Amino acid sequence: MQNENQTEISFTRTWTFNSTKAPLNVDKRYVMLKDSPGFYTYVVLERLPGWPVFYIQEGRVLFKLDENMFQYMAVSDARQRFMPKNQDRRNGQVLGYKEAVLITNATNPAFNGEVDDKYLYSNDNKDIKVHGWVGSNPSLGFWMITPSNEFRTGGPLKQDLTTHLGPTVLHYFTSTHYAGEVLAIKFKTEEYWKKVIGPVYIYLNSNDSANADPSLLWIDAKQRMEKEEASWPYEFALSEDFVKSNQRGALNGQLLVRDWFVSKQDVPGASAYVGLALPGEAGSWHYENKGYQFWTKTDENGSFSIKNVIPGNYSLFAWVPGFVGDYKHASNITITPGSNIQATNVVFVPPRNGSTLWEIGIPDRTAAEFFIPDPSPTYKMYPYKEHVEKWRQYGLWARYKDIHPVTDQVYTVGLSDYKRDWFFAHVPRNVGPKLYNATTWQIIFEIKNITKGSYTLQLALASANGAEVQVRVNNPESEELFTTGGIGKDNTIARHGIHGRYHLYSIGIADTHLVVGNNTIFLTQTRKLSPFSGVMSIQMLDITVPYPSRKGYISTDHVLNPKAVRVICSVSTVSTTPQLLHVNVSQSRDSRQSESDCCLLNDGFWYLGRLKKSKGLTRALLGGDDGGGWRAATRTVDGARAVTTAVDGGWRWAYEIWFGVGDRNERYGGWREKSRRR
């Protein structure tokens, strides 16, 4: 198509069964607009049912530039530099893997001693907006601008390559980098799939002053990137498969966090990532790779607006910095053309089984807060003008042996500082040429009083590669209490990342494993095939004391009942006057889930009970304090009244209430009487 304002060229390829090409129909397009200093490109990919099983491990747009002209590369405000040449790599020394080369005989001697590695210039999807190269004589900038991430896989935290020596300019829309095979797109025989990738914009700019200061063209490219973002979705794309703005919808809402250990009231999920992706379980957006994803960040009030969403059925996901776990809304969201939906009951309840005894690190899905060593003096770092994150350096994993030459890491809660004493990656110990031993880290902590029940260790990993973490308590020779099994292929440790694919484990530790006084948790990373086998450090360790742990708390959360229910709880804390606290509980469309406001006491401690519906009966799993938390509680559901009375001023353990036909029996020694539904 061509007119006075636009030229769009389409190159198509239709797959046939006798073809040796990938089983995809391809429609690749290039667009030039009047007075636009560059061009756009996008592709429509399609596979039909009945075609062969097929994997896509990488999908990208790539441009190779003339290295005699383009010598200055810019990836971010901080990472901008003049680059070595291809010949310098060929003359260098290959290090731990083929992509990493020590420059030893460069055409410009200033580069000698540096490590050239394309992974040094990776970014998160959320930050890959503009990158490119600047040439001289004449000064010319060549920039890849990505105005939207909706067609990328793996969500906003997925890392990928941007640009590197070559000179090479990339746009990755899917890859297994920093994630592993879980993000390879795998098609079954009868599966239909179609997706539009792009458009992305290749922007060209020039400025004679850039011969002296190439960053001038970077500044201009960033301004152009903002203009392209504001123009998304483009109106000029002629393919009927590209969805225009008037055919899209929007979703608005407010994300709240309900964690009794943090606040009596729900708190705004500030600076959280909220997004729509294909329906799946909580956290499935990490490895979703066939559909579109739409993400935004909340403001300080937890408010969010996701605009320009392609019509379809989605799950609403979120994660909140400062809290472990993933959020998924109880109901799927259907976007239709022109819709503007207000999401309700967007409340994230982080996984918690008790009050926190101690924790190590920050639940931010990276290992950036832990100890990151200086690089080996063998390698010279490029002198960037601005600060570049310390972890973007080659060979940091090998420094573990230098810092702990004889024995493995020991961390004492209350004395150690994770910024100084917790190595960022749990890796094997090098004991000889290509020989490695498993490593066992220790966490020493004190317990003054043992609470009966199951303690919980929240083990969050920012990355894993060919690893296995085993957990033992107070006896390093005992059978492991828990093992992750073999996990991870994201190779983040080698590739200078600080996070890869997120893993979260909740590990029960029976009180019988613990003692009054000092206790030790042993974390053994057993896999030792390579120096890169390991986890990107224990991103957060949080051990919780089991309920009951504090006086005066209850909850009537997650009541599944066909109608909205009001539950009245009469509660007394120690010797105070009983109070009436009201809880409104409502059922969601999904009969397996519900949402509610929780019951609070003056000191703000809750017990988050869980209720399940089975054969018309509703079971409440509640708990109490063993030191005198509750005197009595009354629950009324649809006219059925059940009363329980505590013994010695408190309930010692969990108990069950069944609303329906049948007896309610004594459980765990907490009740002295049996009663029937009235």
Image (cartoon, rainbow, N blue to C red):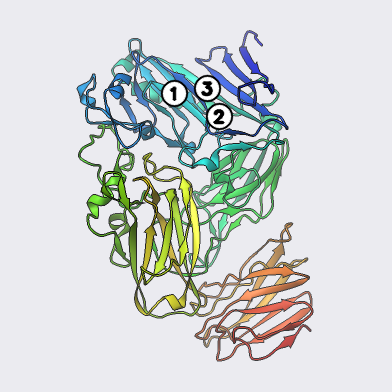
Q: Which of marks 1 and 2 is nearer the N terminus?
A: 1
- Pick the quarter of the image with the N terminus: top right
Residue drawn at the location 69% of the way across and 26% of the way down? 241
Residue at 77 percent of width and 77 percent of height: 660
Residue located at (33% from left, 10% from top): 137
Residue on which the image places disc 3: 201
Work out whether residue 558 or residue 343 is closer to the camera in this orientation and state it: 558
Neighbourhood count class around disc 3 (C-alpha, 10 Å): few under 14, some 14–19, many 20 upward: many
Question: Does residue 126 appear to the left or right of 285 in the view shown?
Answer: left
In the image, residue 88 sits, relative to residue 554, either above or below, namely above
Tag in front: 2 or 3: 3
Residue position marked by numbered label 2 in the rendering: 230
Residue 70 lies, with reference to residue 182, above or below; the image says: above
Q: Which of 378 and 6 is in front in this view?
A: 378
Of the residues tagged 1 and 2, which is closer to the observer? 1
Residue 670 in picture, x, y percent from top left: 60, 86
Q: Using the image, determine if residue 516 lies above or below residue 562.
A: below
Q: What element carries label 2?
A: helix
In this view, 66 is above or below 340 = above
At label 3, which amino acid type do we have? Tyr
Q: Position of residue 94 (x, y in %)?
A: 30, 31
In the depicted view, which residue is nearer to us: 364 or 302?
Answer: 364
Q: Name the residue under label 1.
A: 169
Which class describes the residues within 10 Å of circle 2: few (<14), some (14-19), or many (20+)? Answer: few
Mark 2 and mark 3 lie on one chain; the one further toward the N terminus is: 3
Q: Using the rendered image of the protein, determine whether residue 43 is visible from the camera's viewpoint.
A: yes
x, y percentage for residue 131? 43, 27
Q: Tell whether label 1 touches label 3 (CB within 8 Å).
A: no
Q: Which of marks 3 and 1 is nearer the N terminus?
A: 1
